[in-house]
Amino acid sequence: MRPAHALLLAACAACAVGQAVAPEPPADLIVINAVVHTMNAARPRAEAVAVRGERFVAVGTSAEVLRWRGSSTRVVNAAGLTVVPGLQDAHGHVAGLGAALQELDLRDTPSFEAIVAKVRTRAATMKPGEWILGRDWDQNRWPVPDWPAAGPLDAAAPENPVFLMRIDGHAALANRRALASAGVTRDTPDPAGGRLIRDASGAPTGVLVDVARSLVARQIPPPSRQQRVEQLLLADGELRRVGLTMVHDAGVDPATIDLYREVIGSDRFATRVYVMLTGLSTGDWFTRGPLLDPHQRLTVRAVKLIADGALGSRGAALLEDYADEPGNRGLLVTPPERLYAVTRAAAQAGFQTAIHAIGDRANREVLDVFERVEAEVPRARDLRLRDEHAQILDGSDIPRFATLGVIVSVQSTHCTSDMPWAPRRIGDARVAEGAYAWRKLLASGAAIAQGSDFPVERPDPLLGFYAAITRQATDGRPPGGWAPDQRLTRPEALRAMTLGAAFAAHAERDLGSIEAGKLADFVVLSRDIMSVDPPDVLSTTIVRTVVGGRTVYEQ
Ligand SMILES: [Zn+2]
């Protein structure tokens, strides 16, 4: 029995005979007068928590919990504010978020002209030859939703290579200097798994789809070690601010794990990290085996693979043609035999595998790979194989997640970002059958974890919560929500971003709910997201973020 539990019993014995004896040692932090949604089925609501060291020692009424007060205890009166378990993002890209914070932010630019203006402004501050990087443009938001052509960027930044990533990360726009640095001309053939968009004369317009991005991307000088450390720290600050206490970092190279060790070891980085190694460059990790951490600060026990592209750039691998581009069924970016070989090797080494799959064909290939590996490697199922995104599913594949024990890792804001144009891509029948089909998946018995895929979407978990329960954009459209029969209830949505995500990281014994003995991660919110009108979720603010008993953000 752990000491905390022994003391709990002692405290209860004392209260049973009416004595007010403070347990020794007392709590370090007590929060009282809160509306606590614990996510502990045995006691879903409480009004106070007590923390000693990095763990909860008591959860209950304010009076019950105040028995843990000693002379050194800090007592916070929440005055009716709401407390939820530490929010997790089951799929994000931490260094990518940090890099995005360093780059031109092109999200919400209303036209290509607005992007050109931003590039022109940035070019004025840079030396000739320095790269101008930007991200998150989306032609679907422009008055004319066609692919842009890079000509105006040549005029805006004649001395600088420019490389601007599309919002889904699966297409990019490069100007002439950037194309020249990569030797790309009209004679350059489309690489396998990628495409150069060309004008009527056959010359590249600057738009590079999927694998073709790397023709130019690999010319960009890599960030220095110091810049990479800065990226992690910038991201950590943002994650604390939005109330995230743990992220599953979906695709990390071995060198970045060393940086994590450095910033976590020196206590500069607070967010808990569950690492998915980049599956095609795992270094010697399969020989060494997983890195497990009893404090859950840094865990390495998963690998990430990518089956196909994205829907926006028609790179998602479909079983039938795109509705708006007959003859195109998208691209498998990793051959299924390779997915199988890495998943099998990972399972034998004790690593979970998580595979990006958007289109219905990619999802079927991933389920086939998982089924085959589970049949051959008995422990694979216990490693909790994961399908990242699972956006478009053939109806016959939906029950297979529960059957195979495959976790569905969803991103609810992908749904609300995609809904204005997804029906054009795949047609209404495929939307109705299995697009972002969270309720069908839950009904089938599948385990769901929720994330954002930041920096593709914003990391704010309350945006994800709102999207999950409404299937509406932040402006409330469409009225009633898009395919509203697939919405999650609030308890389901909160569970997917707490216990559900913890389960996906094998961390449900330590994390995901507020109960004595678990690590003390929680978030204080300005409003009760479990009862306010959905639009008021969007104006709810993070008052305090606590990781392992330590306040890491305060409004
Ligand atoms: Zn991702």
Image (spheres, rainbow, N blue to C red):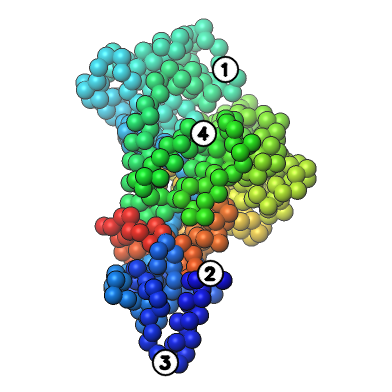
Residue closest to the eye, 356 or 296: 296
Residue type of the residue flagged with mark 3: Gly
Q: Are marks 4 and 3 in contact (CB under 8 Å)?
A: no
Left/right of residue 208 with respect to residue 263 in the rendered view: right
Left/right of residue 425 with respect to residue 335 in the rendered view: left
Depth-wise, is mark 1 or mark 2 nearer the camera?
Answer: 2
Tell me which label, 2 or 3, sits earlier in the chain.
Answer: 2
Does the image show residue 236?
Answer: no
Q: Is mark 1 within 8 Å of ligand 1?
A: no
Quadrant holding the N terminus: bottom right
Residue type of the residue flagged with mark 4: Pro
Q: Based on the displayed image, in which of its 4 quarters is residue 353 positioned?
A: top right
| Residue on which disc 1 sits | 191
Category of crowding for the residue at label 3, using alpha-carbon neighbours closer than 10 angstroms: few (below 14), some (14–19), many (at least 20): few
Residue type of the residue flagged with mark 1: Pro
| Residue on which disc 3 sits | 18
| Residue on which disc 2 sits | 2
Q: CA distance from mark 2 to mark 4?
A: 35 Å
Category of crowding for the residue at label 1, using alpha-carbon neighbours closer than 10 angstroms: few (below 14), some (14–19), many (at least 20): some
Q: Secondary structure at mark 1?
A: loop
Q: Are marks 1 and 3 in contact (CB under 8 Å)?
A: no
Q: Position of residue 85 (x, y in %)?
A: 44, 63
